[in-house]
Image (cartoon, rainbow, N blue to C red):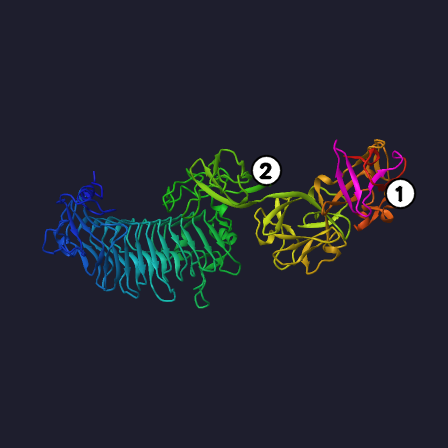
């Protein structure tokens, strides 16, 4: 059995090696040679111990043998490392940069790492920058080479590839990066290179993309695997599989924009192009041409047209198709289970077949292929719809996640796993957190409702509510209520977690402010109450003959002499815009500038609302159907409202004189009289708050104010459209629960004259049985 690649490293940790972090110095490990450029004790003629390390890598490379490790400390080493000895499968030679965060850097035009004619060598976490005269990583006639992490960069315009493999087999490059603008390629595998796996690498041709910088990965040998890499730019192609190569697997790669092809199978045999995601290539995203035979193109996701991805595709750069099959390749290339999409119209045709550019339907007819291909931008079409029997099908996605069956998506794939996704990434939906808040300002409480949260591939296991006051609630159900000890504005933060541990968060702010009352607004302009506009229009209008549930507002103290109006029907505060051009409407559960008003008490007992955002007054147009809007610079009739406490609406008055109910007789045409044995529309009144302890009595019989007519010398009658001196009363609360009404105009009490036989009149100086009423 082969010895683990990090064999001997445990001993390094015990002797003060710094694989991940420094450890206390212990006895030297004879299997490790240390290189510490920055150490004052270093010597290239020393033993290479931790106490007296080498200053450069070259003497360590000359001394190392099978089963030993060269541990290189951080620093910039201007040298080329040639590894001229071999390990064994059980005891490889290991070259490592000692820290994953402070890597050893090989720098300069001659810098790099060469392994020629050796085998069983592991290279970990080295950075090579600025190589020009030779590849940053040059592997020749070698086998059993494992390269993990690190980076290999060449200088711009280098005439050598960043990574070159010549005659290499049984080797791998993984989890590193390749960069620069090489004229030839990022990574090349020559015709004698076989059995090599390039995985989880980032291969990037640095911008700008208007110069010639070759191919990302070029494959010329047999049985190589290019899987799970991230490849950007390159004007030749991201991946090219050349003629003579046989059995190459190109899978799970993420290929981003560039002027050249995405994946180009240029005459190779038996290539499996499977589960790749290719975006925004100026030429063909996937192209199979030349004498290619036995090629499979399946489960790929190919898109074109994002603004960032196509910015370098100019008129001089011909736009290709997304998937094209040409020349002898048309004989037996298999195309199926791919998804192709243009983000925007006017971009290249999706397919090409032997030179002809075709739509999906025409391609299917001409080729007999692509029966399960899709032309769509809907990402859900890629879920659970791949062919797991396709050649080269990877059982995990680009980042190593296993295939997952999404219960919300039908399994339309083929093969043993009918729920695999197309493209390089398996979509594993986590939960989606959504939260709405309901405020109870009287109780100072918030109810958070996460019922609209969506589950992912796994059901939701828990809802955690952070209330923003230092307390939280975690539970299995989506609705929770919290009462605040103090008033203020709080951020309610929700975390929804699935049974698979995936989670999502959402938040909403709530202003839980002191409530001073719950009121309706009666317009002076139309003597109608404010209520919701008919759907689908937002906002309010002053068209209601009576106060209903849509026109009730909690008045809250917003501080600094300002108020906010909480619209109970919507569960949100009223908001006015800054410009004064939009309707006053529901504006969320948070009080900001838009939700703030100043309440102005006018001399006639009405109020006006001045929006803080615009500095303008709220207008209720006289037509009573147009939305309320904060657009007036001065106060007129349309900007005045009577404030009515909700509990003071729809009241009745039962006279103590005869136990009969007061009525605005003949729909308000006759004086008020206590003559009814039951309460109907004529016997209902709203008590309007006029300020300074005074009220107006608004008769529902005709929507008019009750007046102590002729300065109180005539009986009370409901015939006034506004409040003046004769329409003001003081409500006196007597012992025993009765009330009396004192007219402001003459200071006299209202009486049910002659034991209720005559109309009500304000002519008594004291309160007796005839001057007492019971509010119903």
Residue at point 69% right, 49% down?
540
Image quadrant containing the C terminus? top right
Q: Secondary structure at mark 2?
A: loop
Q: Earlier in the sequence, mark 1 or mark 2?
A: 2
- Count numbered badges in the picture: 2
In terms of depth relative to the viewer, which is nearer, 252 or 330?
252
Q: Which residue is mark 2?
A: 443
In terms of depth relative to the viewer, which is nearer, 111 or 524?
524
Percent coordinates x, y for residue 278 in the rendering: 42, 54
Q: Is residue 744 inside the magenta stretch?
A: yes
Span colored in magenta: 728-756
Percent coordinates x, y for residue 159 in the rendering: 27, 65
Quick check: can you spot residue 429?
A: no
Q: Secondary structure at mark 1?
A: loop
Q: Quick check: marks 1 and 2 in contact, CB under 8 Å?
A: no
Q: Residues within 10 Å of mark 2 (few under 14, many from 20)?
A: some
Residue situated furthest front in the rendering = 765
Percent coordinates x, y for residue 572 in the rendering: 61, 46
Q: Is residue 509 above or below residue 133?
A: above
State the separation of the CA atoms marked 1 and 2: 45 Å
Q: Is residue 698 inside the magenta stretch?
A: no
Instruction: Give residue 483's quadrant in the image.
Output: top right
Q: Residues within 10 Å of mark 1 (few under 14, many from 20)?
A: some
Residue at point 72% right, 42% down?
548
Q: Which residue is mark 1?
A: 670
Q: Which mark is residue 427?
A: none
Percent coordinates x, y for residue 229 in the rendering: 35, 51
Horizontally, is 773 left or right of 161 in the view? Answer: right
In terms of depth relative to the viewer, which is nearer, 459 or 359?
459
Residue at point 74% right, 33% down?
735
């Amino acid at each position: 059995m082969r010895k683990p690649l990090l064999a001997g490293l445990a001993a390094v940790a015990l002797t003060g090696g710094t694989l991940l972090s420094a450890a206390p110095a212990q006895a030297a490990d004879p299997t490790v040679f240390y290189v510490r450029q920055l150490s004052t004790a270093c010597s290239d003629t020393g033993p290479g111990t931790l106490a007296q390390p080498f200053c450069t890598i070259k003497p360590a490379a000359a001394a190392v043998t099978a089963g030993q490790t060269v541990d290189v400390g951080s620093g910039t080493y201007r040298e080329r490392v040639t590894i001229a000895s071999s390990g064994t499968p059980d005891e490889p030679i290991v070259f490592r940069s000692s820290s994953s965060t402070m890597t050893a850097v090989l720098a300069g035009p001659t810098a790099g790492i060469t392994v020629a004619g050796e085998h069983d060598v592991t290279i970990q976490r080295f950075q090579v920058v600025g190589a020009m005269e030779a590849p940053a990583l040059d592997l020749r006639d070698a086998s059993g080479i494992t390269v993990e992490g690190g980076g290999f960069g060449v200088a711009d315009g280098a005439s050598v590839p960043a990574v070159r493999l010549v005659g290499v087999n049984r080797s791998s490059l993984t989890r590193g990066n390749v960069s620069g603008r090489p004229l030839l390629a990022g990574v090349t595998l020559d015709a004698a290179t076989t059995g090599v796996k390039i995985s989880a690498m980032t291969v990037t041709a640095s911008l700008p993309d208007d110069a010639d910088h070759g191919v990302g990965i070029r494959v010329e040998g047999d049985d190589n695997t290019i899987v799970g890499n991230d490849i950007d730019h390159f004007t030749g192609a991201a991946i090219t599989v050349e003629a003579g190569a046989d059995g190459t697997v190109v899978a799970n790669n993420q290929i981003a924009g560039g002027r050249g092809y995405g994946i180009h199978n240029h005459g190779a045999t038996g290539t499996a192009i499977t589960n790749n995601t290719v975006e925004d290539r100026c030429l063909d995203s996937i192209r199979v041409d030349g004498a290619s035979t036995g090629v499979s193109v399946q489960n790929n996701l190919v898109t074109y047209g994002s603004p960032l991805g196509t910015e370098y595709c100019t008129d001089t750069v011909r736009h290709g198709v997304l998937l094209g099959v040409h020349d002898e390749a048309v004989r037996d290339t298999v195309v199926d289970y791919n998804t192709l999409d243009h983000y925007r119209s006017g971009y290249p045709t999706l397919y090409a077949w032997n030179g002809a550019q075709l739509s999906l339907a025409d391609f299917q007819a001409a080729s007999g292929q692509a029966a399960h291909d899709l032309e769509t931008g809907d990402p859900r079409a890629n879920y659970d719809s791949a062919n797991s029997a396709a050649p080269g099908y990877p059982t995990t996605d680009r980042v190593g996640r296993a295939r997952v069956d999404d219960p919300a998506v039908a399994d339309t794939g083929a093969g043993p796993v009918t729920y695999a996704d197309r493209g390089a990434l398996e979509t594993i939906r986590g939960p989606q957190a959504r939260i709405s808040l309901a405020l109870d300002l009287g109780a100072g409480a918030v109810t958070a409702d996460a019922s609209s949260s969506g589950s992912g591939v796994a059901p939701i296991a828990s809802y955690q509510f952070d209330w923003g006051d230092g307390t939280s609630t975690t539970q299995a159900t989506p609705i929770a209520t919290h009462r605040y000890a103090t008033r203020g504005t709080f951020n309610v933060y929700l975390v929804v977690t699935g049974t698979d541990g995936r989670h999502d968060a959402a938040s909403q702010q709530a202003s839980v402010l002191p409530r001073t009352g719950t009121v309706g607004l009666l317009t002076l302009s139309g003597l109608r109450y404010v209520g919701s506009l008919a759907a689908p229009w937002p906002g309010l209008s002053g068209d209601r003959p009576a106060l209903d549930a849509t026109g009730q507002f909690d008045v809250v103290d917003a501080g600094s002499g300002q108020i906010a109006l909480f619209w109970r029907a919507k569960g949100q505060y009223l908001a006015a815009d800054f410009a004064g051009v939009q309707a006053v409407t529901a504006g969320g559960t948070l009080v900001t500038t838009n939700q703030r008003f100043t309440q102005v008490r006018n001399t006639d007992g009405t109020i006006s609302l001045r929006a803080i955002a615009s500095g303008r007054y709220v207008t209720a147009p006289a037509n009573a159907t147009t939305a309320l809007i904060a657009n007036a610079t001065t106060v007129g009739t349309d900007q005045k409202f009577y404030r009515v406490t909700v509990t003071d609406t729809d009241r009745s008055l039962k006279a103590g004189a005869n136990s009969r109910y007061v009525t605005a007789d003949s729909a308000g045409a006759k004086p008020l009289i206590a003559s009814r044995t039951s309460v109907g529309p004529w016997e209902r009144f709203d008590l309007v708050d006029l300020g300074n302890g005074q009220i107006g009595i608004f008769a529902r019989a005709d929507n008019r104010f009750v007046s102590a007519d002729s300065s109180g010398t005539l009986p009370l009658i409901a015939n006034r459209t506004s409040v003046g001196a004769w329409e003001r009363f003081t409500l006196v609360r007597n012992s025993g629960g009765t009330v009396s009404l004192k007219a402001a105009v003459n200071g006299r009490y209202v009486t049910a004259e002659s034991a209720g036989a005559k109309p009500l009149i304000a002519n008594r100086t004291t309160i007796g049985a005839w001057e007492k009423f019971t509010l119903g």
